[in-house]
Image (cartoon, coloured by chain):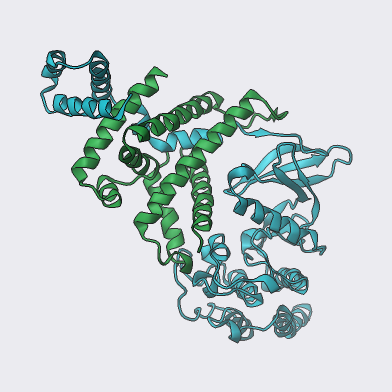
Chain colours: A cyan, B green
Amino acid sequence: MKPEHWERIQALFHRALSLPEAERADFVASVDEEAEVLTEVKMMLSEDARPAELFNSGLGQIANAILHGGVEQQKFHPYRLVKLLGEGGMGVVYLAEHEETGTQAAVKVLRDSWISPARRERFQREQDSLAGLIHPHIARLYGAHVAPDETPWFAMEYVDGLSITRHCRHHHLDTLSRLSLFHSLCEAVEYAHENQLIHRDVKPSNVMVSTDGVVKLLDFGIAKQIDLSQPGSIDAQRWMTRSHAAPEQLLGEPTGVFTDIYALGLILYELLTDRLPFDPSRRVPEGEPPTPPSTEEPLSHLCLTAMHREPEQRFSSVSRLLEALEPYRQRRSRAAGA
Amino acid sequence: MEQKTVIDDLFVLAYEELRRLALAVRRNDPSETLNPTALVHEAFMKLSGSNSFEATSPLYFKRVAARAMRQVLVEAARRRQAEKRGGVGFVRISLDDWPEVASTSNEELLTLDVTLRELAQLNPRQEQVVEARFFGGLDVAETAALLNISEETVARDWRAAKAWLSSELRRR
């Protein structure tokens, strides 16, 4: 078709539409036009008269089908996939078993890796971050691979358990036991910092407690090398979880060790009170966090210091936080033992 | 920020939002469909707080997001088609319950994309109207403001384009 044809087709189409429906066919028949143009107008009128399935059912249905239809996966040698554990924007996580040893692992696959370099970089970053970390409280990387179609994937330690907050509630843990879990988490974060890595997304769903009670820190997907941190980059903000983001993350300001300290303070707050101090959907940081209710003074003070609005007012390192926590823990455990 | 980076960021965002939403929707009610308007809106809200996007108007964002959405879906559909033809030694794991629907949608979307490009040859503005309305979920007023045309023109373009595209899709 030529543009001039299209113009004539549309003009007739709109003129026909301005008439009552019963008169349209006669009108088109009466027009002195090329047959090709008239055929097109008739077809368009008949389409117009019926519901446009594609456009009405909308993009959503199509998107749904395309993005979900056909979960084709390749072989993840030497792992055999057992079941789907979770699925997010970034990738898919499967529970897998080593074909020879039977060891369980979590296999993380970057689905549709071709979509953009930024996604591949982020996936790669998690892999690189994990590769350097060997700690009893950090889920370990077993190996990184690329599938035949260039889909990147890696296998890591599978943690069967609950998030730290759910674990505490489920087992009705007392404060002392909760503090002990928190202590392990702090050690993991401190170890990452010693390795020049800021986690930047420490939140309960990334802190698992295995069925045998061991804390494991997961998901270094947005971790950043301390010396590479760039102020206010969109990348730094895009992936964070708003409910657990530090004020500087919400504002797009530089992140640092102090960002993880804030997150630790927030987790401590949740562990002590079973709730969040703020509205989780907040878009901008509020003032200072409220004092955690029914919490002993040294602990509430510790929480509030870790979560101070101003990064420089927080503990300067995880070890400082632990130093402040230790005397209290010891006193409590002596009291509990007595 | 470089234009390319912005597009790439939006691309990733649109894609991952779409996937995330699709998952959430399917979990709640498998028969419910996604709402592109809400999707693009949510994506914008997510970004609007950040410094890098201060200069981005909602309208500009929606335009880029509409394009990103189209490209993401077309690319995804293409890949799925290629996988179905089995080029790369795939092993199918039966996690999906509706391969039939998927295959129809793949073809439908790819045909729509080709047809839209033909429409662009006939009238570039109409392609933009369809892209904004269908892929970006923009309403008539927003589309008019974006393309600097009257709402009446948007309505006429949309109706004619829809009728023509539908008849082309039926024919192919």
Residue A38 in the image: x percent, y percent?
Answer: 22, 17
Instruction: Using residue A311 as the reference point, say whether residue A8 is left or right of it.
Output: left
On the question of residue A52 being in view, the answer is no
| Residue visible at 85% across and 37% down in the picture | A99
Q: Nearer the viewer, residue B136 or A218?
A: B136
Q: Is residue A198 above or below residue A43?
A: below
Q: Is residue A36 above or below residue B77?
A: above
Q: Report which quarter residue A228 is drawn in.
A: bottom right
Q: How many marks?
A: 0
Q: Is residue A174 above or below residue B71?
A: below
Instruction: Using residue A43 as the reference point, say whether residue A282 is left or right of it.
Output: right
Instruction: Using residue B146 as the reference point, say whether residue B85 is left or right of it.
Output: right
Residue A178 in the image: x percent, y percent?
Answer: 69, 69
Residue A10 in the image: x percent, y percent?
Answer: 22, 28
| Residue visible at 89% across and 38% down in the picture | A100
Residue A337 in the image: x percent, y percent?
Answer: 79, 78
Q: Nearer the viewer, residue A62 or A94?
A: A62
Q: Is residue A154 above or below residue A308?
A: above
On the question of residue A292 being in view, the answer is yes
| Residue visible at 30% across and 31% down in the picture | B162
Q: Which quadrant is the C terminus of chain B positioned in? A: top left
Q: Report which quarter residue A318 is drawn in.
A: bottom right
Q: Nearer the viewer, residue A251 or A48?
A: A48
